Amino acid sequence: MQLDFIINKWAVWPPLSPEQDSAAQWLSDISPMLKRRLTPLAKTVFCTVAQCLDEDGMVPAVFSSAHGELAKSLSMMEMLEVGEEISPTGFSLSVHNAIAGLFSMAWKNKLQCTVLAPGEEGMAPAFIEGLGLLQEGAERVLLVFYDEPLPAFYPSSPYRLSSDSSCALALMIAKSGTGQALTLFSSALIGNDGEQPVQLPAFIRFLTEPQTRLTFCMPRRSWSWEKRYD
Amino acid sequence: MSSLENELKKLIIESLDLEDIGVDDIDSHEALFNDGLGLDSIDALELGLAIRKKYNIRIDSEKDDVVNIFASVAALAEFIDSEQRAA
């Protein structure tokens, strides 16, 4: 199976070059009443999304995060353990689709929004979902990948499922138009190249460097992205 | 402005993360929800919890007239004042 698509636009946060714009600039259009609900990870996500969206912001979106904001759930469980009442706001924002919900409110986006927790499959499932939407007729689809380090409470070693820093990557993909043409394909190769937080930095390097192919081997199959110059 | 109203404004700002707003920006008689200050239903729950923790007063959505209690800072102060007197 080979799937062709184009990355029209992409953005990563924190920015790759330090002299790049500040977070405040990308968050300036968000209303203060909504901005107060944004966690540091949500702000990281919004900084990438703001750079990829056009003014109307109307595009179906696929969000992918291995762990979401698990630290929030953990701190609520710790509060319950000592018999304290938990914050309704904190509770409402602790679900895996909280950031996607805030996204739809901030950009008044009423189109389809999917949130994945891809586990050992890493970044590939969000591409499969997004390419499916393109196949169904969507002109463009926004893919958003984000993760933050797992709280120390959870054992991340020896598993390759967490990274040391928060990171978000947004991609606007389409079937045609300008940008980087890519082909996605799978093979039977297996391995353990880690979950999304580990894959994300490698994918960003793939976008910025001349390397033409990137392969992630997972326990059940592998996925490759290859740049096309036709 | 009564000191209880002042205290409630501080509680609203702190418990609801209204970073850009000061005590002087909230009018005691202005609507807290929707058109006024612009708070939403999650804020109502959060504020209810903050009041429970600070004043040990439970606002019962079955029994109490929640819409009027949360109408403004002045209305909320009046409710808390009457609950404290009754206790």
Image (tube, coloured by chain):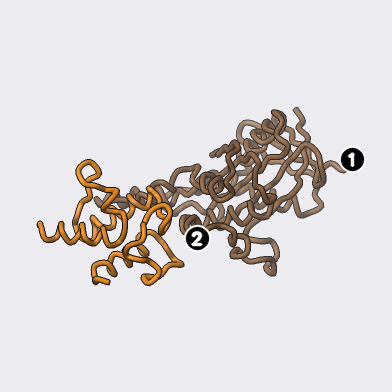
Disc marking residue A32: 2
Q: In x, y percent, where is residue A81?
A: 28, 49
For the residue pair A86 and B3, the one nearer the viewer reads as B3
Residue at x 39%, y 51% (from the top left corner): A89
Question: How crowded is the residue under tag 1: few (<14 C-alpha within 10 Å), some, or many (20+)?
Answer: few
Q: In x, y percent, where is residue B49?
A: 28, 53
Instruction: Count the labels in the image.
Output: 2
For the residue pair B78 and A150, the one nearer the viewer reads as B78
In the rendered image, the vertical position of residue B35 relative to residue B25, given as above or below = above
Q: What secondary structure is found at the residue carrying circle 2?
A: helix
Which-is-in-front pick, marks 1 and 2?
2
What is the quadrant of the N terminus of chain A in the image?
top right
Tag 2 subunit = A
Residue B26 visible, this angle: yes
Residue of label 1: A230
Q: Residue furthest right?
A: A230
Residue at x 69%, y 69% (from the top left corner): A19
Q: Colour of chain A?
A: brown
In the rendered image, the vertical position of residue A20 relative to residue B51, given as above or below = below
